[in-house]
Image: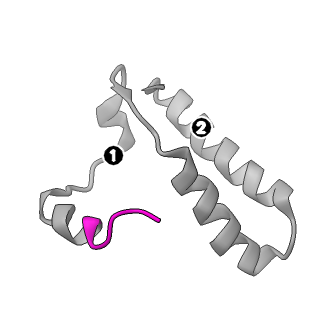
Amino acid sequence: MGIKRLYTFFKPSFQERHISEFQGKTCAIDMMGWIYQGFFSLLEYCGDNTLVVIRSIERKIQLLQRYKVNVF
């Protein structure tokens, strides 16, 4: 579903940053975006292997934990 052209609306305000800049801060994560990305892009390359998708999400969570980013 989602909002059409939402990305293009906000794109001018996006800035690339290293995750370490968010150390000690709290952020919200759209897990459905990660799950969607996993199932529709990773599965294209890895076949019907849901474990690959789960591991991909786990790696992203571990990255946030390594840099001490609080997630809710």
Q: Position of residue 3 (x, y in %)?
A: 33, 64
Q: In the rendered structure, does residue 23 fall within the stretch colored magenta?
A: no
Colouring? one colour
Q: Position of residue 69 (x, y in %)?
A: 43, 27
Against 70, is 28 above or below? below
Q: Which three-letter amino acid code belongs to the residue tagged 1?
A: His
Residue that carries the numbered disc 1 in the rendered image: 18
Magenta-colored segment: predominant secondary structure: loop
Q: Is residue 32 left or right of residue 15?
A: right
Q: Are marks 2 and 1 in contact (CB under 8 Å)?
A: no
Specify few, some or many for label 1: CA neighbours under 10 Å numbering under 14, 14-19, or 20 or more: few
Q: Is residue 50 left or right of residue 37?
A: right
Residue positioned 38% across, 41% down in the render: 19
Q: Residue furthest bottom?
A: 44
- Which stretch appears magenta? 1-6
Q: In the rendered structure, does residue 5 fall within the stretch colored magenta?
A: yes
Residue positioned 36% across, 19% down in the render: 24
Q: Across the whole image, how many numbered discs are drawn on residues?
A: 2
Residue that carries the numbered disc 2 in the rendered image: 61
Q: Residue furthest left?
A: 12
Q: Of helix, strand and loop, which one carries label 1?
A: loop
